[in-house]
Structures are given as C-alpha cells and as structure tokens.
Amino acid sequence: MPPKTEPKAKAKGKAKVAKKEGEEEDFGIERVAEPDKAAYDKAYEEITAKVDALQAKAKAITEKINAQSAGGDEFSTQKSALLQQLTLFNTKIKELSDKKAEINQEVTGKRQEAKLAKDELIKQKKALGYTTESDIDDRIRFLDDRLRTETLKLKEEKDILKEIADLKKRKPEIAKVKGLEATLSKVDTGASQWESLTEINSQLNEYWEGKKQVLKGLDELSAQRTEKMGDRPALIAERQGYNDESKALIEERNTLRDAFNEERKNFNEYKRLVREKQQEKWAAERKAKEDEYQKQRKLREAEKLDDQPYVTEMTLIEQTISFCKSLTGAKEEKAAEEKKEVTHNNPDGTEILMRKEDREEEFYFAPTAKKKSKSKNKSAKEGGSAKAIKHNAATFKLFDELKLEAPITTDDIPATLEKLEEQLESYKAKVKEWEETRAERKRKILEGIEEPAAEEAAAEE
C-alpha cells in the first residue's frame, strides 16, 4: 500500500501556510469573517465593571436598610401571633360555612321532595275527578236510575255501563289518595333544621367579628412598623433603581455574548465546511493515487504470470538428478533420431533392400540356452560393488528441500532418481496447467475479478 501519513502531513503544512498568507481555499463557500475576540473582551469587561459598581451601591443600601430593621424580631413575633389567630378564625368560619351549606342542601332536598309529592297528589286527584267515595256512589246511583227509568239507545247504554265499571275501579284509588295526602301533611320540610341554622349563623357572626379585629390589629402593627422604619421605602425604591439598571446592563452583556457566540459559531461552521471540502479533496487525491497504485499493482501481478512459477523447483530437481547420475558415472542418453517414413515407388515384382540396422532379427529356431558366464563369482562381485556416498551440509540441505532422504550408497540412487523423475513430471504437469490458465488469470487480475495470493500481496506491500 502507498504511504499515507507523509502526504497528509504535507497537506496540513500547506493549509497552515495558505491560511497565514490569507489565501486559504474556500471551495466556493461564502467566507465568514472571524469575530474580533479582543474587541468583545473589552466591551464585555466595560459592561461588567458598570454592573459591579451598581451592585455595590445596591449592596450598600441593603446594609443601610438592614440597620434600620432593628426590632424586626418582635414585629415578626407579633405578626405571626396575629396571623395564627387569623388562620384559626378562617378555619372555624370555613367549618361552619360548610356545615351551613350542608344543612341548606338537606333542607332544599326535603322541600323538593315534598313539592314533588304534592304535585303527584294533585295529578292523581285530577286523574280521579272525585274527592270522596260518596261522590262516586252518587254518580253510580244516578247512572243506574237512568238505565232503569229512561229509554236509551244501545250505544248510550254501553257508555253508561262502561262509566259505571270505571267508577267502581276508581273507588279504591280514593283511599290511596287520602292516605298519600295524610302522609304528605306529616313530611318534614326542614323546619327542624332552623334552630341549627340559627346557632350556626350566630357563631359565624362571632368569628367574622373576631377576624375583623385581627385584621385591624395587623393593619395597626404594619403602620407602627412603617412609621418606625422612616425613609425605608425611599431606600428600597433607590435600590430597586440600581437593580433595574444593573439588570438592563446584564441583559445587554448577555446580548453581546450571544451575538459574539453566534458569530463564532458561524465562523466555526464555515471553517468546518472548508475542512470537510479540504478532506474531500485530499480523499479524492488519495483515492486517485490508490486507484493508480492498484492499477499498476495489477499490471505487475499480471506481468508476473509471464514468468514460469516453478523454475526454481524444476532447476533444483534437475541439478539433483545430474548430481545423482554423476555419482554412478551414467551418461546421458542421446535423443533418438526421429524416423522418417519413406514412400517407395518401386515396380511390381521388385523388392527394396533395407539397411542392416533397420532389419528385424530373424531366427530359424528360437535359442534354447544362454551363454554361460565365465566367472562363477561374478554375481557375488556385483553384490558387493555398492559404494558409500560422501555428503556434506550442502547436499543434505539439497535433498531436505526436496523432502527426500539423501542416498547413502550408490545402490540407493536408482530409487532416488525415480522419485526425482516423479517430482519433475509433477512440476511439468503444473507448468502445463499454468500455460493453459495464464491468459485467463491475467485477464481476471487486470479486471479485478481475481486478487493475487495473500503472500504475493504482502510481499508487494
């Protein structure tokens, strides 16, 4: 990754220089002037000095007023006693007033009930139409006489019979109405409460009178205190004037402070916006550098794919094979020449005579016995022909890097060569795979689809 700390430090240094020279870039943001802190401090201190002077004068008047307040404890004691009496009278007056209101409410309720009962009685009397049972009996006899003595139409007779039946039904209601009337005459409409109300009114008058006396005593006590205090009201008024003037100055000072804080806030906001734009500019520059760096890094990684990745391993294996062969004196086999097919256009009935080395061996009969060895101890000599191999630290390290055991004798070399050939073939297969995928991997790395191995990226950084 490209270094970030150093460019950032350089950018800060440039910003300080630009600010000092008055050429700070504003990125199109409306400039806000920095508030004058020295002028603000001077104006603030002047107002504070005036406020302190006024408060000192008000304090001196307060001390003078306190000096005139001798005897204040006695006045407070007397006033407190009178206030306690006043509280007591108020409490009693409230209790009696509540009781009176309760009785009045009860009397009003009883009167309302009696009125409703009376209205119901009048309504029932009107509904009956008769006040006594004898009146109903007289009416019934009269109707009976008409039925017996007069010649009436059928409808008239039915009406008379219906009225007689109705009168007989109303007759028991007369007794009920009389009983209700008797009960109503005995209903209490609040007359029994008048004595209680009279007693309560008498007590209320006494407490109201006592309250008036206490209030009068308070007025007299306050008058005596005012007379004793002398010019205290004038001093209080003068002190109030100083306090009002001081309050106005404090408000002016607060307004000055708020205005300065608002200007400083706007200036700080302007600086913040400029810093943000500067940070965005630096971030864009860093991003451009990072993008360019990543582009170059991907290009380098893609170019690395042109280098065969297993050169070191294969070279090491080939050198080891050469080393092993040198221990046995084996010669490298010569590459066989490729045979070319030759087309012969000989005439029919003719044959082409081949070279002797190209002819196949032909036997009239298969050989049945092998030629005997002249020396009977030849095999014994071959079995004891193995020679020990002298190694040093370099050769041991060579085989250790290939994860193989170093051959101890010349008899171990064939097996070792076989393993080395296997490793070499394995790497050749990897090289073939690398050759087949190299173009595609280069494309993916350049397009950002594939990232290089972590070890390669760490080594690059």
Image (tube, helix red, strand yellow):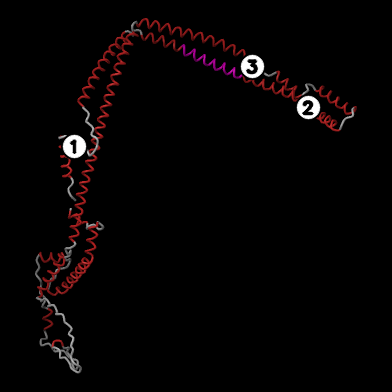
In the image, is residue 443 above or below residue 49?
Answer: below
Q: Residues within 10 Å of mark 1 (few under 14, many from 20)?
A: some
* Disc 2 to disc 3: CB gap under 8 Å: no
Q: CA distance from mark 2 to mark 1?
A: 114 Å
* Disc 2 to disc 1: CB gap under 8 Å: no
Which residue lies under the disc numbered 1?
24
Q: Is residue 368 visible?
A: no
Q: CA distance from mark 2 to mark 3?
A: 34 Å
Q: Nearer the viewer, residue 179 or 397?
A: 179
For label 3, the SS is loop
Q: Nearer the viewer, residue 252 or 193?
A: 252
First in residue order: circle 2 vs circle 3 = 2
Looking at the rendered structure, the kind of residue marked 1 is Glu
Q: Nearer the viewer, mark 2 or mark 3?
A: 2
Q: On the rendered structure, is 175 left or right of 405?
A: right
Q: Nearer the viewer, mark 3 or mark 1?
A: 1
The number of numbered discs placed on residues in the rendered structure image is 3
